Image (cartoon, rainbow, N blue to C red):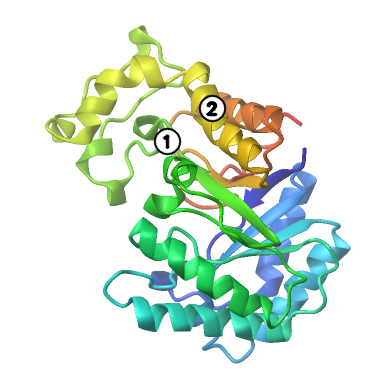
Amino acid sequence: MPTGINLTGNERVWEKPVFSSKVVIRKMKEAKKAGYSSFRVPLALNYLFQQSHFEKELLKLIEASIQLDSRLILANFNHGLSEKNYSQAIERLYSDWERVLSVVPQNPGNLYFELANEPDLNPDTWYRAVQDLVPRLHKIRKDIPFILGATNFNSLFELSRIQPWSLEGVIYTFHFYEPYLFTHQGTDWTGPQNSTLGIPFPYESSSMPRLDYRAKGTPGEINYRDYEMTGNSVAIQDKIGQIAAWAQINGVQLWCTEYGVTQNADADSRKIYLEEVQKVLSQHQIPGFVWEWEGNFGIKKLTPPFLSN
């Protein structure tokens, strides 16, 4: 089972990234040496298309993936989809992918497009949007599969509730950051619920820190209370097993395009967790992509020890 990794940075519009294929290819080569054979590249397409060199640089990246004999996902981030600006954002999403489809070469078999990362829409709105949007894009060309996820941050639980779209040439995806108390401990952007540091994996009562006072009265207090039941391999197997069963029943392809844990967790716990998730994904023949090579969740310094192909 190929092991995948997210090569992040070009989705962080707040950092005003300038797309450089040279930088991304360097990361690809580093990760390839560490044992990764599939790459997901998050891109803020609408933002990056404002850079005159972006299309040429994108072609260089695709060519490099072919030379490295690696699977490549181009994933669209910061697309702005929401209930408030739905009509405008959905047309922008279409025009951005239309532009990509007009530029990239015939798919050599390694290229995939992820339509919209973690759409912030009502599930019914998103379901109808996909059913309309993908056929429109397929009229341009159909040789590149689209990857589709559910709402609520590409939730596996939301995905398991839907009937697969009546579409050809699509792959379904989910993100896995369970248990959240462990994977997102100490991350400022998730608020006080994850303020407790030192959460181990797997759960061990003697190693558990006290609940941070800022987490009291938040979902983090409940997650802390339940961690004995959620912070173990059985819980991971149960959750991933549910969505794997959904995919099997419906006869669809399923990938996990994000799973990971913040660097705020201790290195040993991170390795154990990543190994466990990868093992379960492999058991269900689900390609997985670690979040991320470099960054707050970066695993560059953890590899190659935890890879378990």
Where's residue 127, x and y in %? 45, 61
CB atoms of marks 1 and 2 within 8 Å: yes
Where's residue 45, x and y in %? 53, 77
Residue 183's disc number: 1
Q: Amino acid at mark 2?
A: Tyr
Quarter of the figure that contains the C terminus:
top right
Query: Is 158 or 230 nearer to us in this picture?
Result: 158
Binning the other alpha carbons within 10 Å of mark 2 as few (below 14), some (14 to 19) or many (20 upward) gives: many
Residue at x 72%, y 57% (from the top left corner): 28
Eyeballing the image, is 235 above or below 119?
Answer: above
* Residue 10 shows in the view: no
Residue at x 35%, y 25% (from the top left corner): 198
Residue 305, quarter of picture: top right
Does residue 172 appear left or right of residue 188 in this picture?
right
How many numbered circles does the render carry?
2
Where's residue 108, x and y in %? 85, 67
Residue 111's disc number: none
Query: Is 114 or 168 nearer to us in this picture?
Result: 168
Does residue 121 appear left or right of residue 168 in this picture?
left
Dot placed on the residue nearer the N-terminal end, 1 or 2: 1
Where's residue 147, x and y in %? 61, 59
From mark 1 to mark 2, how far is it between C-alphas? 9 Å
Residue marked by disc 2: 273
Q: Amino acid at mark 1?
A: Thr
